[in-house]
Amino acid sequence: MSDFELEKRAIAGDDESFSILIEQRKERIYRMAYTYVRNKEDALEIVQETVYKAYLSVEKLQQPQYFNTWLMKIAVNAALDHIRKSKRVVYMDKDIERSYTPDNREGKLDLYEALDSLDEKTRTVLMLRYFEDMPLKDIADTLETPLSTIKSLIYRGLEKLKINLGEGELLE
Amino acid sequence: MNKDLERLKKDYQNIEIPDELTSVTRQALERAKQERARIKQVQHHDASHAQIDNQSPSEKSDSIQFDRGNRNYQQSQQHSGKSQSQHALPRNRWAKRIGASAAAVFVLFTISVNTMPAFASSLENIPGIGKLVKVLQFNKGEAEGGQITDSTDIYAIGLHEKGESDQITIRFQQNHIEQEVASYFHVNYREFPNTMTFAVGGARNFSAEQDLATLKKSRFVQDAYTIVSPDDSLVRFTIVFKEPVAYEVKEYQQPAEVVLTLKQGTPAEAKDNIYSVRTASHPFGEEQGVMEEKLLEEEHVRILKDSAGTYLVEAGYYPTKEEAQSQLKRLEEQYGMQGQLHVEERTYLQMPEQIIGQ
């Protein structure tokens, strides 16, 4: 069965199709969540929250082709929500954060260092674009932000990371 | 793609996926299903408020539902409240918007679940994902399964409608990881009224306790409640049936799951009333434990909830009043329970009445 068919069925209330779709995407949700919180427990909680919310609201999704962006939107929001909630209670310990960071080899940019140097939104945009290979249009939909803003966030983000793309690569 | 980005992407893809991920998503799905079922129950409750009004158990489950709703609502209020307080910081503007849109998502979903009749038909069925270990063989209404474990949490109990039958699933976790094999459990089935009691050993937590209320949604289930346990590593709960049911209990592993399937039983031919020998009613607590222990040698001892929501211990029931009274005498003398036991006449499916002791 195609994803589109599964998405259609999930929206119509078919639990099995929904489960299959979540099964296929759970690792992506987890990785994304992990980059925000950098620890397994919190990342799992975000996944849980995402699946829970998604299940309860899937029927309001009108068009099956938006299933992915819609799910990612819920996941991003769940992650940001989670961060805000935990910040209210206890501030992230920078040292603990460091300890999750792999060795920084020869001044090369490492993943978490790179992400840390960016603000929340730029980080999300770059992650969706380059790690999740999401088209710009979908990112704009996911974050409910105009396409032009997404583009400039990407430009500025890459600049900050001192990453130079070849001509035209951004819009590929 | 750019080399640096390539490398970052690789790092990203190397983020280790924990083993628990599958059980976490399954658990979330299970919870969400139950939440949806509860929401439907509330709708039903609203629609037939007058009808349900005098049934305190259903009201209780609804109030749980409302509490939860409120909690979520407060949370989302807190979020937007917080984001507003950060208004002065421009770098958090986006955070504010996301916060607001999260609240919007929440509001939307609240509206959608309250107005969407399509939800009503979608209680799909996922019990029995693991491998079948066995179908329990009941002997004189008793059966057992599973393996001895410790620190188990009975974390989810679900209800699934499947055509003519309803399935009740019980799931087990240890340290938030779904168990491979079910914990040791004992089941007994009794009549007058028809009850099934599960006793799960090595269970120190019962996260699914709140799920028991959901079971009352089943057309076969009158009530479901926890009963007092003689020690802190045993969890016991009882399901009371509305009508004669045919039942089957299956045990699965990888992941561990116990599935109770209920079907319409053969309609009982007019059964004569019985005479129960029982204690007075008390609120949930130690009292039942003490009484049960005194009567432990009686084969048919069980703890029941009465029609007023208090609890009692039944030593057994008998076909005639005379026999019940002579049994009562025997029990009083044998266990030193003078004045603590009563004889109560009940019809086939009648719940015990509240009896206030001296």
Image: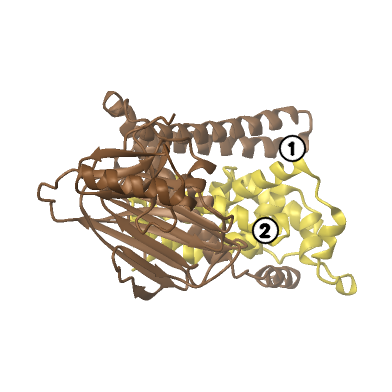
Q: Is residue A60 visible?
A: no
Residue at horizontal 26 percent and vertical 52 percent from the top: B191
Q: Nearer the viewer, residue B84 or A88?
A: A88
Q: Is A71 on the left-hand or right-hand side of B320?
A: right
Q: Are marks 1 and 2 on the same chain?
A: no
Which quadrant of the figure contains the C terminus of chain A?
Answer: bottom right
Residue B304: x %, y % from top left: 38, 44
Which quadrant of the figure contains the N terminus of chain A?
Answer: bottom left
> Which colour is chain A painted?
yellow
> From this viewpoint, which residue is outermost toward the top?
B50
> Which colour is chain B painted?
brown
Residue A58: x %, y % from top left: 42, 48
Residue A165: x %, y % from top left: 72, 65
Secondary structure state at the residue bearing disc 2: helix
Residue at horizontal 61 percent and vertical 62 percent from the top: B151
> From this viewpoint, which residue is outermost toward the front?
B333
Crowd rating for badge 2 (residues with CA inside 10 Å; few <14, some 14–19, many 20+): few
Q: Is B62 on the left-hand or right-hand side of A70?
A: left
Snapshot colouring: by chain
Q: Which residue lies under the disc numbered 2?
A: A41
Quadrant position of residue B139: bottom left
Q: CA distance from mark 1 to mark 2?
A: 26 Å
Residue B177: x %, y % from top left: 58, 65
Name the amino acid, label 2: Glu
Crowd rating for badge 1 (residues with CA inside 10 Å; few <14, some 14–19, many 20+): some
Return the chain for callout 2: A
Residue at horizontal 31 percent and vertical 58 percent from the top: B189
Secondary structure state at the residue bearing disc 1: helix
Q: Is B72 on the left-hand or right-hand side of B330?
A: right
Mark linked to residue B92: 1
Q: Nearer the viewer, residue B77 or B333?
A: B333
Quadrant position of residue A133: bottom right
